[in-house]
Image: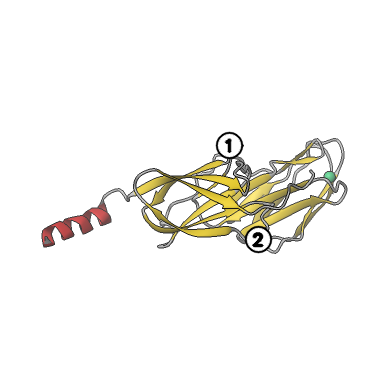
Amino acid sequence: MKAIALGLAAALLAGPALAGDITVDVRDAAGKPVTNAVVMVKPAGGVPAGRPMRVSWPMVMAQQNIQFSPYVLIVPLGSSVSFPNKDKVRHHVYSFSAPKTFELKLYGKDESRAVIFDKPGAVSLGCNIHDSMIAFIYVTDTPFAMKSGIDGAATVQDVPAGAAQLSVWHPNLKARGPMSRPLAVTAAAQRTTITLDLRPSLPR
Ligand SMILES: [Cu+2]
């Protein structure tokens, strides 16, 4: 018995860490898929050292056709995000959000600016010239983060097995912060559904 326990302990210490993929289906109160939700998993034991976020999208918030693109951008804490203007008209990007308050004064076509996001949370963006321009940057302090697609699904890969917290944020959430609940991560792939209490969509 003791030998087994020791062997198990050694395997846990030495072997490849047990980890699993988690797919979250984000739904609204009517059961419809919710796109552009930010799904995050935080291991209770902390994020393993040397585990950077694997980001498969550029750290870019463009202005094109008098809109921001993308509508929601997830960036790891400490990221520098560029704000290229691809329109012929000038834009004046600003944020009053607590994680990052900034202003990029009027700049024109094919110009860009960069901003470093050094505090976690949601940053809402606007343009002083065009009121209809709205977008969000979510700065995450866990590498296990993914945006939901049009099917409402987001898969977060290689989360260490054990106790964790699942958090989901969306621009239309009625609550101020992300919605959170405990999650037991296993070495096998798992799938779970989370239902958000959302305000009706704002016109864009
Ligand atoms: Cu503008």
Residue type indicated by callout 2? Ala
Numbered badge on residue 39:
none
Residue 65: where, in percent of width, then height?
80, 35
Quadrant in the picture for the C terminus: top right
Q: Which residue has dot 1 on it?
A: 151
Residue 123: where, in percent of width, then height?
69, 56
Does residue 84 appear left or right of residue 25 in this picture?
A: right
Does residue 186 appear left or right of residue 129 in this picture?
A: left
Image: 107 above or below 140: above
For ligand 1, tell me if the residue under mark 1 lies within 8 Å: no
Q: Nearer the viewer, residue 176 or 85?
A: 176
Q: Which residue has dot 2 on it?
A: 175
- Sequence-wise first label, 2 or 1: 1
The answer to whether residue 76 is seen in the rendering is no
How many C-alpha atoms fall within 10 Å of the one at disc 2: few (<14), some, or many (≥20)? Answer: few
How many C-alpha atoms fall within 10 Å of the one at disc 1: few (<14), some, or many (≥20)? Answer: few
